[in-house]
Image (cartoon, rainbow, N blue to C red):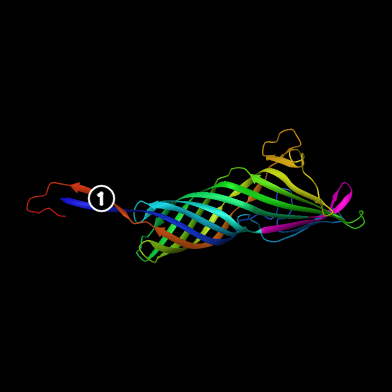
Amino acid sequence: MLAFGAHAQQFFIKGGLGYSAPQAGQSLDGTGTPYNGSATNNATGGITYNYKSGASFSAGFSGTFGGGYMFNDHVGLELDVIAGLAPHHYTGNINNHVIDSVAYNISVEQYAKTFWLVAPQIVLQTGGSIWNLYGRGGVVLPLSVHLMQNISFTNLPGNGAVETQEQTYDNTTSFSLGLTAAIGVQYNLTDNVCLWGELNMLSMSLNLKEQTLTSESYAGQSISLSGQNTSYPYSRNYNSALAQNSNTNPSYSIPFSNIGIHAGIMYKFDKSSNHTNNHARPSHGRVTEF
């Protein structure tokens, strides 16, 4: 018996946009400040919290572009790059907080200025000629993440002239490993072009590594940082193993998980075939089959 088999192989590239919401987000950061709400110090010594749902710094609008290779009509590999385009901004307030015997209201705005993630994944699909259902999953690696903090301190009436001090910090994170998965559908416009839409999720937490003061002002007047941004409190290191110096602080996790809906377009290059031949001696009374 003589048999021929062909496995269609194909490269593809893709791009898309989407919106993600926080998934398993946190309500408080490592300093006890609400990401999205307020904490008020009471005259009795207690604290009243009023905060909204959990935060995630990857939530908001993001873009995806990447490509991959299908070994056959059903199994392949994909490599995506995920970029934050318009992430959520979160504002937390600490009211009546006393510093050096002066009471302040503190406002902390936090958001991801930029983030770039890379995600190698396995793809499984039905391989339909018009509608193609697929699922994919893999790991996520952070290429670059910068988180911004805008902090303002306003002293309360009765504590001298009411003035505001503002500080902006650029925070970087340590390397972490996350997970991603998606289920979706493709609609083939032609043999080479298709539209896709999917429901996807990201599970990741990042650990704060370094915090650097990038700008400061007092009563509306900018303060020069020349010669200051290399020492505490202008630059702070964070580590789970603390050294015995004032420049190292305990690190804490930053929420980065989301669940979202994304859509886009894919271009599939022409398929190539890998032929295999199997040879066998024909049995008596039968002809060779092709």
- Corner quadrant of residue 37: bottom right
Majority secondary structure of the magenta segment?
strand
Residue 283: horizontal and vertical position, in percent? Answer: 10, 50
Residue 280: horizontal and vertical position, in percent? Answer: 15, 47
Q: Which quadrant: the C terminus?
A: bottom left
Residue where numbered disc 1 is placed: 275
Judging depth in this view, the residue of 246 and 205 nearest the camera is 246
Residue 198: horizontal and vertical position, in percent? Answer: 48, 62
- At 65% from the left and 47% from the top, the residue drawn is 253
Residue 9: horizontal and vertical position, in percent? Answer: 33, 53
Residues shaded magenta: 89-106
- Corner quadrant of residue 62: bottom right
Q: Determine whether 227 is above or below 106 in the image.
A: above
- At 59% from the left and 51% from the top, the residue drawn is 115
Judging depth in this view, the residue of 78 and 93 nearest the camera is 78
Q: Is residue 103 in the magenta section?
A: yes
Q: Is residue 42 in the magenta section?
A: no
Q: Residue furthest top?
A: 244
Label 1 packing within 10 angstroms: few (<14), some (14-19), many (20+): few
From the viewer's perspective, is 131 left or right of 59?
left
Residue type at tag 1: His
- At 24% from the left and 52% from the top, the residue drawn is 5
From the viewer's perspective, is 153 left or right of 158?
left
From the viewer's perspective, is 251 left or right of 154?
left
- At 88% from the left and 50% from the top, the residue drawn is 102
Q: Residue furthest left?
A: 285
